[in-house]
Image (cartoon, rainbow, N blue to C red):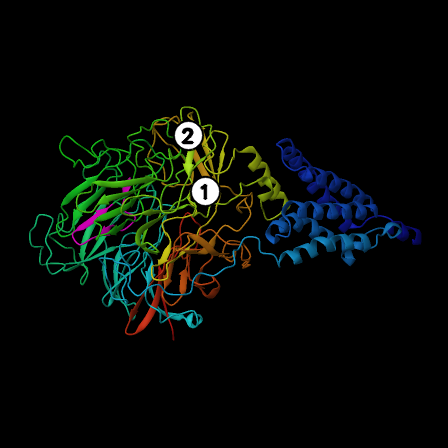
Amino acid sequence: MVDDRHALKDKPGRLIRASAIFAGVAGLALAVGGGWLGVLGGSWYYFVTGLLLFVTACQLWRGKRSSFVVYGFIVLMTTVWALWEVGFDFFLLAPRFDIIVLFALWLLLPFTLKSFPDSDRPGRGLLGAAVALPILSLVISLFFNHHDIEGKLPDTVGADTPQWDSQQLPDSEWHAYGRTSYGDHSSPLKQINAQNVNQLKVAWTFRTNDIIGKNDPLESTFEVTPLKVGHMVYLCSPHQWVFALDATTGKQIWKFDPQVKDDPTWQHLTCRGVSYHETPVDAKTSDGAVPPAECKQRIILPTNDGRMFALDAQTGEVCHAFGQDGQIDLKDGMTVKTKGFYQGTSPPVVTRQMIIMAGAVTDNYSTSEPSGVVRGFDVYTGKLVWAWDPGAADENALPSATHHYTPNSPNSWTLLSADEKLGMVYVPVGMSTPDIWGGNRTPLGERYTSSLVALDINTGKRIWSYQTVHHDLWDMDLPSQPSLVDLKTSQGIVPAVYAPAKTGNIFVLDRRTGKLIVPAPETPVPQGAARGDCTSPTQPYSELTFQPKQKLTDKDMWGATMFDQMVCRIMFKKMRYDGPFTPPNTQGTLVFPGDVGMFEWGGIAVDPQRQIAIANPMAFPFVSKLIERGPDNPAAPNAAHPPGSEIGVQPMYGTPYGVDLHPFLSPVGLPCPAPPWGYIAGIDLRTHKIMWQHKVGTTRDATPLPLPFKVGMPMLGGSMVTSGGVAFLTATMDDYIRAFDVTTGKELWSDRLPAGGQSTPMTYSEGGKQYIVTAVGGHGSFGTKQGDYVVAYALP
């Protein structure tokens, strides 16, 4: 019996055998994947580590202390390799170290060591010393910040006179999506300031009861920015229900339901806002007549099924003299009238006499889509006054029995801005669908794609245009409302327009002439389009840009562990990526920044007095892969219209290809390129320099465990700035509202939201109290928690 007990001590125990099996499986996986990566031209580290890990497994199985020596070498080699690749960057080091370090610590545990045979039990010295190095490296990396920019914006307020805007509002109000038609997302209110913002508390919460259902599109969102006029707050919900609330209590005063029906085949279900108009004393209709007596104050509502309503702002009743008993059909004059193919997702610009309406079309479905025509309607009668059709030979031809708007002409799905003093409306023009292959496009159809265009408010005639992407094959259009700023220079006031682009460029032009204020030189870009297509040899790069300065490499790939990081590196090497504007192809193209854009509909916030801007760019990667026609990808529709989505396989009927568009994610669902993915930044408009930039957003709501690592998260929505020196943001993927010091970008306050805050906040005052208001409803395709909340904050 004694001899038997001693014999047992000479064999490894179950823990060591289990450890050997783990090391063997992990080693084989790394060796196979690492060999594949090496053949593709990537790092051979994973292959070598896999072989050494398999040797470690064999020695562990035999219960040999030499397994600790081999594994200690793996730890040392990994530390040197990781620091050589990425330096002291915590979030890049972590997936390189996590499995390696955790397994070393497992082997060093007392009960694991006891599972070794007595005769060959290893000491802790060598492996313990080796594993201390990566742990020390991670600790040191916490003191390095490789991505933020520390600096300050000028803290002096500009000259006394506010910039000119026809909508000179009381400081207490917010009359348009960007507060005014200038699109500055800025308020002169200053009761809430950098010293007291941390005292904000919820003042009221309103719930719309508009709940997203199973028959609604994936892209169902609550993106509204409310308005405040008089004593009422106005907003719309995803199904375009309109609510008027008491500005003090948030209690509902009236509600209007346009009866938009659920339909999962639509690409979007969203309402970014409503528009407001008040009849001036000397008002006339476009025909010179006296306006109707009804609806002295009116709310304008576009809908996702292609209609537009005028409502009495006091009662919510339709304005009967507008169109056909309060509504007009925006599909009139179109060749394609299928509901959901033309959608009014963004509120129109409303001027003294006109409603100027653009709209979204279904992306990447076919070459037979509604027109992207921009139209001017009489604000009192709904009569069509003018049209600007960017795909037509006669841009201003009105529809008739013999003329329809041009199918597939470029559309403007986002928000417009207007300068009534200059008599111009500024249109950020998008793409003519399909977006990702352009071999069938004509020079006529591409004149204005991805351009900023200035139109005459009264006639719709084009005054100037500037193209930000030539022959756009990436859907890199202008997604944001342009911001109009009167720049104070040594030569006097220069009226400027700022146009954020999905590329991360912010194009700055004289809004009178369209001439560049900040240079944007034409720069050579990658070539080699798919069969039947072509590319522009150059693209304009603004000198005011957030576009990453360095191209991605496989060193930049990320993951939760070294295993999914290795898979990301393999996927990266298999795709084509030559930097921005790499042409789409059947191999698969990495689009970075992705086609969701560095900027989206939220735009930028501008303090015109201080001459500064707050931006919240993001850098999130996408994959674009053209798919040849075949049995699973027919050349023409052979079934019902598929569920609307901008992610996944999209048919692009009428072209030689379909396209698969999806985020570039690791096997566990994390973005493959490493964080940060989202920032908040401050721009000095006197110098057009980015003075500070900080990553914003945590992993709190994006991982199974609620760990609030501040990595800089993707976001949808914009910022808002006040004269109290505070900027507000709710757009990040974690469920928070945050306040920032405008001068330094320091986070001053945050509060937990009941759902995703993919919207743009606004502010107003009522009864001497300033309120911060934001919609909190989440975003379907973004994956954030959905809800139906509107939350207002105020000081106690």
Query: In the image, which residues are magenta?
Result: 340-357
**Residue 394 found in image quarter:** top left
The stretch drawn in magenta includes residue 108:
no
* Between discs 1 and 2, the one toward the N terminus: 2
Q: Position of residue 179 (x, y in %)?
A: 29, 59
Q: Is residue 744 something one can see in this rendering?
A: yes
- In the rendered structure, the answer to whether residue 619 lies left or right of residue 256 reads right
* Residue at 33%, 37% in the rendered image: 449
- In the rendered structure, the answer to whether residue 9 lies left or right of residue 188 reads right
Q: Nearer the viewer, residue 672 or 207?
A: 672
- In the rendered structure, the answer to whether residue 120 lies left or right of residue 286 reads right
Q: Quick one: SS at disc 1? A: loop
Q: Position of residue 445 (x, y in %)?
A: 29, 32
On residue 594, which mark appears?
1
Q: Position of residue 766 (x, y in %)?
A: 28, 71
Which amino acid type corresponds to the residue marked 1 in the rendered image?
Gly
Which amino acid type corresponds to the residue marked 2 in the rendered image?
Thr
Q: Which residue is mark 2?
A: 535
Q: Nearer the viewer, residue 46 or 484?
A: 484
Quarter of the image with the C terminus is bottom left
Q: Quick one: SS at disc 2? A: loop
